[in-house]
Image (tube, rainbow, N blue to C red):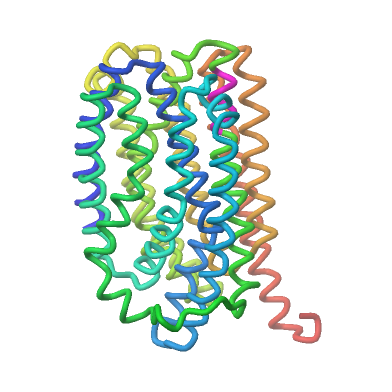
Amino acid sequence: MNSLVIGIRLVVSFFIQRLLAILVGEEGISKIGQLRNLTQLLTSLASFGIFSGVVKYVAEYKEDSEQLQKLFSTSLLFVLIGTVVTALLLFFGANPISERLFTSTDYAYLIKILAVLVPVISIHRIFTGVVNGLSMYKKYAKIDLFGYLASAVLMIFFLYEYNIDGALLAIALTPLIQLTVLLVIFTKTLKEYIQFSKLRIMTSFGKGLLAFSLMSFFSSVLLNYVELDIRTMIMTRITEADAGIWTAMTFISKNYMVFSGGLFTLYVLPKFASITTEKAFKHELITIYKTLLPLFGIGMVVIYLLRDYIILLIYPDFTEMAPLFKWQLLGDFLRLASLVLLHQFLAKKLVRSFIFSELISLGLFYGLSYYLVDIYGVEGVVMAHFLRYIVYLMVVLFLVLRYFKKQKRNTTNPSDA
């Protein structure tokens, strides 16, 4: 079901990307990349980064209505804080944010629109966490598909009517469409699990959710900030067209990597959350690797061999993108292997391990990009992407093995726990 939905999304996405490439060019693609990074950053900030925590606790307590009510009441507190702070920062900082992202204040109105939509963004994120935690695969697939198709229609209409300004406005309005679709499909189920009239501002799950907030800050907020900064760096050190070339490469990467996204949130995270022994974890890890990695490996080889045709089909005239494929694909394969392991940190709330590994990854990407771009141009950024994931995989593997050794030692010697 997940693959079918993503397959449809890919076809639509490729069509839209081709339109964007033809109508707005590399510079327009660069601007779109900036706004998408901002909206992804806002998604985490507005919901206070508790998405993975909601998934974990809903999966654990879906049969316990009392605990769920406490969870949602605590989530309400976090969302209120995230929404108010984020909306105020966006609204009153619209001009400098626009200047930072687009080297102009012309798009300050977009930032203010996003500020108004911050509550929509946060509510949608939390409700999506509930869908994932309940592992309602079919409903999730419907919400994902219909929300994406509605957003795509809006993008195409605005793009033809208003060119790059319309494309940016469509991206800003996408969260509103997604929430509307979710509520149409999922409202009845939400009412079964959330007693909205009895929601109170509580802190019962505060400590647990705060751990996920910290992890989200490093995995999502900092990641999107780093990508924003690197794109700005490419614009200033090389050209905005080169920034668009790199952005187009990351769009292709995100389109094929999205196959793993639903798997992680719908299956891997809830599964790892319920596993308590090293033997069961290793068995599940091997199963996932045997199923997932060969499929992705074959797919990535095919993408590399067909790279010139892909560029011609999706991004006509973006021929400078061809040398970027090998580094991006190699890095993404290592990233996929790392992300499976990384979800053990989320499932077991291993906050320090998660933060340490993310700092290593982002620090390497940031530093290597700034160093290599002067030597290899825009290709240096994707080389940095590959090099960081070599180190990242080794770091995550070491930390997971250390966690189980510590668990075994504590089980053998309870007095040392």
* Secondary structure mainly formed by the magenta segment: helix
Q: Is residue 229 magenta?
A: yes
Between 153 and 296, the one lying in front of the other is: 153
Q: Is residue 96 left or right of residue 118?
A: right
324 w.r.t. 65: above or below: above
Left or right? Give the position of 16 relative to 196.
left
Q: Look at the picture and state if 336 lies above or below 316.
A: below
Q: Quadrant of residue 14?
A: top left
Across and down, in percent, residue 293 comes to 38, 48
Residue situated in front as seen by the camera: 164 or 131: 164
Q: Quadrant of the C terminus?
A: bottom right
Residue bounds of the magenta highlight? 227-234
Residue 175 against residue 268 in the figure, above or below = above
Q: Residue furthest right?
A: 416
Q: Is residue 106 visible?
A: yes
331, above or below 49, in the image: above
Which quadrant does the N terminus fall into? bottom left
- Visible residue check, residue 383: no
Residue 301 shown in magenta = no
Dividing the picture into quarters, in which one does residue 97 lie?
top right
Front residue of 193 and 162 = 162
The residue at 49%/43% (across/down) is: 335
Q: Residue at image x 56%, y 55%?
A: 84
Residue 198 percent coordinates (x, y):
44, 83
* Residue 396 position within the rendered picture, expressed as x and y whole percent measured from the top left: 61, 52
What residue lies at 20% left-to-right and 45% top-to-bottom?
149
